[in-house]
Amino acid sequence: MSEEIVLEVKGIDKIFPGTKALSEVNFQLRKGEIHALVGENGAGKSTLMNVIGGIHQPDAGEIFVNNQHRQIRNPLEAQQCGIGFVHQEIALCPHVTVAENVYMAAVNTSRKLFVNYKTLYKKTTDVLKSLHSIKPDIKVKDLSISNQQVVEIAKALILNCKILILDEPTAALTENETKALFKIMQDLKKQGMSIIYISHRMAEVFGQCDRVSILRDGHYVGTYVVAESTSQDVVNKMVGREIGDMYPSKMDEEEDDTRVLLEVRHLSNSNRFKDINFKLYKGEILGLAGLVGAGRSEVAKAICGLYPKENGEILFKGKPLEITQYEDAIKNGIVYLTEDRKAEGVFLDLPLKQNISAMDIKQVSSKGFIDKKKENRQARSLLEKLRVKYSSLSQKASSLSGGNQQKLLIAKLLSVKPAIVLMDEPTRGIDVGAKAEIHRLLRELAIQGIGVIMISSELPEVIGMCDRVLVMHEGTQCGILTRDEITEKRIIHLASGL
């Protein structure tokens, strides 16, 4: 890593209506380094990157690229400064080829009437050669998420990118895909590329990055050499307090409730899973563990009527349930938290109070009309219970940070007073502080007698939170682990089909 500074921001302020997102923030990026940017949701990470990327204009402060003062007024000017931005949500055209995506800007500015695809494919192959072997003529929609990220990186490289911003790049990747991305990052670093790496995952920060800068509540906390720091130090600086244990205490064995809330018998779908059997007890957190593609989400959705089941029986408090659609599940007190909160969870353009009341409008209605006072009272009560940071019940859900959007989605589910909640990756993409709060909330729900089924790809979370764990491998149930049996070794052993 060189001492040469390729990017510097000084005293950056950014104000949105009612919120000061950034306050006198400083940041330096050196040539050939991978520099982590961390902070809780809402700390200002994305806002700072959007300022550097030309999406937002700062209200104060300066930006220097290669020691030259630059005013970056739009993403095109950021590209001209050698800055490439790979967003967490991929921004490619899915129905055209890899080559057309990589060279779209060049094709759009060309004055030629026809595109020479032979030349275009060769040029794309040459660019991708240094990254990953992807055919240039395949349509983007047919690529995995990890390969789509490679295409995004290739787009940046052909625009002479020297500074690459990666925003939560591993959020939707498998373990092997993540390793492939890390290799690409390290290769780019050796070639002199400077990378800003945004992540909530401390293992990635300490495994891949040279330095780490911390933001808290829109303020710059400091920059530290990764090799001279610990993950606990970084986490404490992020949240401004000691996190302590990430997972609340489980109930003692003698406190277990033996009343069965939900029983699943021989649940099957020939395409995704077969012969799934388990019981969920009152006040229990039951984990569904397994590798990506094992069928965990499909089983949870089948219980709720969101995915077809071909065979099997579902019993609620000993009585058979016929659930053909999600509405049937809700009526019986069974709710599902999706793993994709933005696409399938919260209504981003609706106010907070309408997001919460949407699960059951009748609860806040009177004589066929929505009672605004009831709706406000319901929303305020749940948002305060879940410690959601908000300024108004009428603000749009899109204005919340990722962690607070997740809490809003949980508030939406709790509005119908469920007996059973199925949580699919409840802490994906949120910071350590928000994770600890959601862990606390899940245990509180269990203590209140609610049955919780939790799907998580993070083994420490499964081990720390669950009272029992059902492990799946390629659609089959491999075993149910209890208490002292819940270890990383045993879960991996079963999840691998051994």
Image (tube, rainbow, N blue to C red):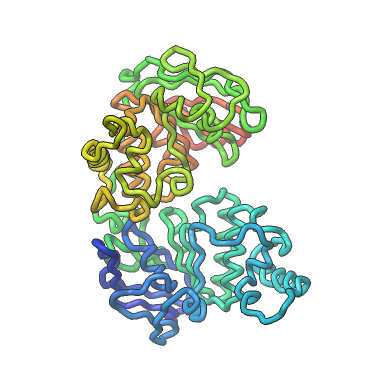
Whole-percent x, y for residue 422 in the image: 43, 32
The residue closer to the viewer here, 455 or 307, is 307
Quadrant for the C terminus in the image: top right
Quadrant in which residue 112 is drawn: bottom right
Query: Height in image: 257 above or below 472?
Result: above
Q: Is residue 11 left or right of residue 162?
A: left
Does residue 249 sit above or below 344 in this rendering? above
Say if 334 sits above or below 206 in the image: above
Would residue 490 be seen by someone viewing this image from the given angle? Answer: no
Residue 395 visible in the snapshot: yes
Residue 464 x %, y %: 39, 36
Residue at point 69%, 58% (across, down): 139
Identify the residue shown where x is 26% and y is 69%.
23
Identify the residue shown where x is 40% and y is 45%.
346
Using the image, determine if residue 249 lies above or below residue 139.
Answer: above
Q: Between residues 275 and 110, which one lies in front from this camera angle? A: 110
The residue drawn where x is 51% and y is 64% is 86
Q: Position of residue 270 (x, y in %)?
A: 66, 28
| Quarter of the rendering containing residue 406 | top left
